[in-house]
Image (cartoon, rainbow, N blue to C red):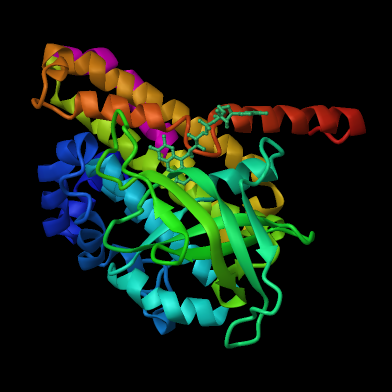
């Protein structure tokens, strides 16, 4: 799909959603007025069911189709794409969870948009890369095994950043270390579980319509019925390609939109950057194809470094595209409300910092290269 063809994609397939996003993109970035409407809007357009098997209530298709849907939304509103990422990634956790009961219980409301899904796994991803310890602890709750007689815990700790904590109701995925030892678990934590507190929205410079807040748990009772996996490290390695692939969808869409924005400059400005725009567009198409093929074939489970390289390359394209859009937009881009140029600058600023961050990945790749040199396995 070429850069410009795709800009018509969402408008053709989900015109009501595309129009809603275009109308509210600025507000979704600058305040929380419409934050409760994003998930229902995405659900009404059918986007939450993409890549979910039909027998589970989905629309069928692949995770690659879901990545494209995140990209399509990001062309119109990065904030909405980030919400879609959170919701669709949580849905993916359930699809890849061995806990069928949990899937049956939560999936229908997540697919219909009645319930918001939030993924608080930055901490777990950083833990996996030995950057920080897990921030949540699960203490065994002896003798309190619930009606089912299954293992039960009391969970305490906090996560400083989680998106899609929709005030009308959410469930959040979080990793917890067991005080009794053994591999950490990942739990689905309901907004109304005892001891769960959501902070006010964080005072962000952008993406303010995304229901981003901190989450605190104090002696929150959970049982095995709430557990997405009992082996977080092994499970995360398998889920990471979908997690990161969907996240890369945000970069794909944003870069595409900025490149298309260079068309809105005058003929002289367009001519000046034409070669750079063509090169970035081509790079973007190549990266998208590699991303989708790698996720579809499961390559990135065994060789995550290839996925990390794609994420870094995409962030570079986003940066380059946003810069070209500024250059061609001229002074108009510096005036409030006249174009999306300033918003896309703020949106682009988020791309390098979302976990796994660019500096994190660069260090991981460097460590891997050093290890390969030591063992003589460098290619
Ligand atoms: C608007 C917004 C929404 C967010 N939504 C979510 C969400 O939904 N879910 C979620 O889980 N998180 C979310 N986050 C968190 C985000 O994904 C990052 O984890 C967070 O911004 C980085 O954490 P920090 O600032 O505490 O990094 P710090 O720990 O202060 O580190 C700074 C940077 O250095 C890197 N770094 C630190 N130590 C090392 C090391 N040893 N080697 C290499 N690199 C290192 C970090 O990765 C980071 O990029 C959100 C953040 C923002 C700003």
Answer whether residue 280 is visible to the viewer in this image. no
Q: Quadrant of residue 51?
A: bottom left
Asked if the magenta segment contains residue 280, the reply would be yes
Side (left or right) of 293 relative to 201: right
- Which residue shows up at 45% across the image and 49% down it? 215
Answer whether residue 110 is visible to the viewer in this image. yes
Q: Quadrant of residue 65?
A: bottom left
| In front of the other: 257 or 73 | 73
- Which residue shows up at 59% across the image and 35% down it? 309
Residue 65's place in the image compared with 360, above or below, is below
Asked if the magenta segment contains residue 275, the reply would be yes
> Residues in magenta?
268-284
Task: Point out the residue furthest to the right here.
Answer: 375
- Which residue shows up at 56% across the image and 70% down it? 222
Q: Quadrant of residue 23?
A: top left
The quarter of the image holding the C terminus is top right
The percent position of residue 56, horizontal first and vertical second, equals 42, 81
The percent position of residue 368, horizontal first and vertical second, equals 76, 33
The percent position of residue 219, horizontal first and vertical second, equals 56, 60
The chief SS type of the magenta part is: helix
- Which residue shows up at 51% across the image and 77% down it? 102
């Amino acid at each position: 799909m070429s850069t410009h063809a795709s800009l018509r994609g969402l408008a053709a397939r989900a015109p009501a959603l595309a129009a809603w996003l275009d109308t509210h993109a600025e507000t979704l970035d600058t305040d929380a007025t419409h934050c409760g409407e994003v998930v229902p809007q995405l659900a009404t357009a059918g986007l939450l069911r993409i890549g979910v098997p039909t027998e589970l209530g989905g629309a069928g298709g692949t995770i690659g189709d879901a990545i494209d849907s995140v990209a399509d939304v990001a062309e119109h509103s990065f904030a909405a794409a980030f919400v879609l990422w959170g919701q669709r990634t949580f849905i993916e956790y359930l699809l890849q969870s061995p806990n069928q009961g949990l899937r049956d219980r939560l999936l229908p409301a997540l697919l219909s948009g009645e319930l918001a899904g939030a993924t608080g796994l930055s901490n777990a991803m950083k833990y996996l890369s030995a950057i920080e310890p897990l921030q949540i602890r699960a203490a065994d709750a002896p003798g309190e095994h619930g009606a089912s007689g299954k293992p039960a815990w009391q969970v305490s700790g906090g996560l400083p950043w989680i998106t899609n904590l929709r005030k009308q109701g959410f469930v959040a995925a979080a990793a917890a270390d067991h005080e009794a030892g053994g591999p950490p678990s990942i739990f689905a934590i309901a907004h109304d579980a005892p001891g769960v507190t959501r902070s006010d929205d964080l005072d962000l410079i952008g993406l303010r319509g995304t229901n981003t807040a901190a989450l605190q748990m104090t002696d929150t009772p959970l049982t095995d019925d709430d557990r997405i996996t009992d082996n977080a490290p092994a499970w995360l390695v398998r889920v990471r390609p979908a997690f990161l692939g969907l996240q890369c969808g945000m970069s794909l869409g944003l870069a595409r939109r900025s490149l298309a924005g260079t068309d809105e400059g005058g003929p002289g400005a367009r001519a000046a950057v034409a070669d750079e725009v063509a090169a970035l567009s081509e790079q973007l198409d190549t990266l998208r194809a590699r991303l989708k093929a790698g996720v579809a074939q499961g390559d990135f489970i065994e060789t995550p470094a290839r996925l990390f390289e794609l994420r870094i390359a995409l962030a570079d394209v986003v940066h380059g595209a946003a810069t070209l859009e500024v250059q061609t937009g001229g002074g108009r881009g510096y005036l409030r409300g006249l174009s999306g140029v300033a918003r896309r600058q703020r949106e682009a600023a988020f791309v390098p910092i979302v976990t796994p961050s660019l500096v994190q990945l660069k260090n991981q790749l460097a460590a891997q290269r050093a290890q390969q040199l030591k063992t003589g396995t460098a290619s």
